[in-house]
Amino acid sequence: SNTPVKVAVTGAAGQIGYSLLFRIASGALLGPETPVALQLLEVTPALKALEGVVMELDDCAFPLLHSVEIGDDAEKMFDGANAALLVGAMPRKEGMDRSDLLSANGKIFTGQGAALNKVAADDIKILVTGNPANTNALIAKENAPDIPAERFNALTRLDHNRAKAMLAKKLEVSVSEIKDLAIWGNHDDSMYPDLYNTKVGDNIAADLVDEAWIKDEYIPTVATRGGAIIKARGASSAASAASATIDHMHDWLLGSDEIVSMSVPSDGSYGVPEGIISSFPCRVKDGKYEIVQGLELNEFSKERILASAKRLQDERAAVEKLGLI
Ligand code: NAX
């Protein structure tokens, strides 16, 4: 249809925004036929820089870019939004501990959750990229009682893409030969990529590599990739994070033939407790995802998944204590 889809993006003047907006406007999010109206939220001091980004968006003459609005008022920028990409968050600063970070970000996501609740479109889908992504998504969800819980997701697709690329490199195969890989748990160093259910052609990935490699090399390398990028680039991952954000929302809106990793509100599947937003293998079709059921998990996988879920339960307890949910 020719009706533009309204896509709200927060943190639009940041690093990830600088990559994300151009790909959305070029059609990577909604496909080559659907026009997009961008509604960009920033903090007041960043609006000037954001104006510059909008000038560059104009200069691309993207045929699918219907309009761009910018502002510092969440209720205006989320008005009628069909999709919201919540990228803007407070980065951890020198001397800040985890609880300071949760509290600084908590204030952002309580307000944005409430604003979405008030003004977003009925079909709103919300994806949180800003860290700590899973718990920020939980805070937004808890502050938006009228929006169905399953509309709040957090990004673990970057971990998924990293895990896939690293396995492909190890096995010297194309990424397209790797199927059914999934990240479980939290987007932090406890997240678990399960190779025991991952397929490479007709084989199970775990059968093609040493167990010691999985445990001592693969999992830690995937989990610490963000830090490795900072070391090499002098700045945190941005283009790859934007690409993963597009992948997740694209598949959620338009479906995917493959199993993908999505952080979604737990329904208790596989013993992951309810009340947290955790990464699961999901199938997506017709704008809806389902957690893949019936997978066999070995003892090692179960242990790792529950350990990561425990981190999320601890974060939940911390934000409860702070009165954010
Ligand atoms: P930047 O610091 O470059 O940009 C963040 C932007 O958010 C800034 O322009 C800031 O003004 C804005 N902002 C802050 N508070 C806001 C508010 N209340 N409303 C609207 N905008 C607000 O960070 P960038 O590198 O773009 O990363 C953004 C977030 O993504 C960070 O929290 C980062 O930790 C997180 N990441 C998450 C990843 C994931 O896989 N889930 C990976 C990449 C990235 O590290």
Image (cartoon, rainbow, N blue to C red):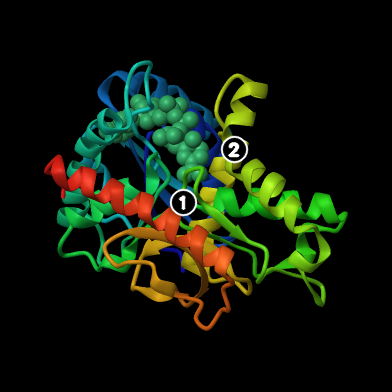
Q: Is residue 30 visible?
A: no
Q: Position of residue 191 (x, y in %)?
A: 51, 51
Q: Position of residue 210 (x, y in %)?
A: 79, 57
Q: Is the residue indicated by label 1 positioned so its CB lies within 8 Å of ligand 1? A: yes
Q: Residue at x 47, y 77 (%)?
A: 286
Please indicate whether residue 192 sits to the left or right of residue 66 in the image: right
Q: Position of residue 218 (x, y in %)?
A: 70, 48
Q: Residue at x 33, y 23 (%)?
A: 47
Q: Residue at x 67, y 68 (%)?
A: 196
Q: From what the image shows, is residue 208 above or below residue 241?
A: below
Which kind of residue does numbered mark 2 sit on?
Thr
Instruction: Give residue 269's quadrant in the image.
Output: bottom left
Q: Residue at x 79, y 55 (%)?
A: 168
Residue 225, numbered label: none
- Picture quadrant of ligand 1: top left
Which kind of residue does numbered mark 1 sit on?
Leu
Q: From what the image shows, is residue 278 above or below residue 219?
A: below
Between 106 and 247, the one lying in front of the other is: 106
Residue at the far bottom in the pictured view: 294
Residue at the far right in the pictured view: 172
Residue 224, numbered label: 2
Task: Classify mark 2: helix, strand or loop.
Answer: loop
Q: Earlier in the sequence, mark 1 or mark 2?
A: 1
Q: Which residue is mark 1?
A: 155
Please indicate whether residue 81 sits to the left or right of residue 214 in the image: left
Distance from Cα at disc 1 to Cα at disc 2: 16 Å
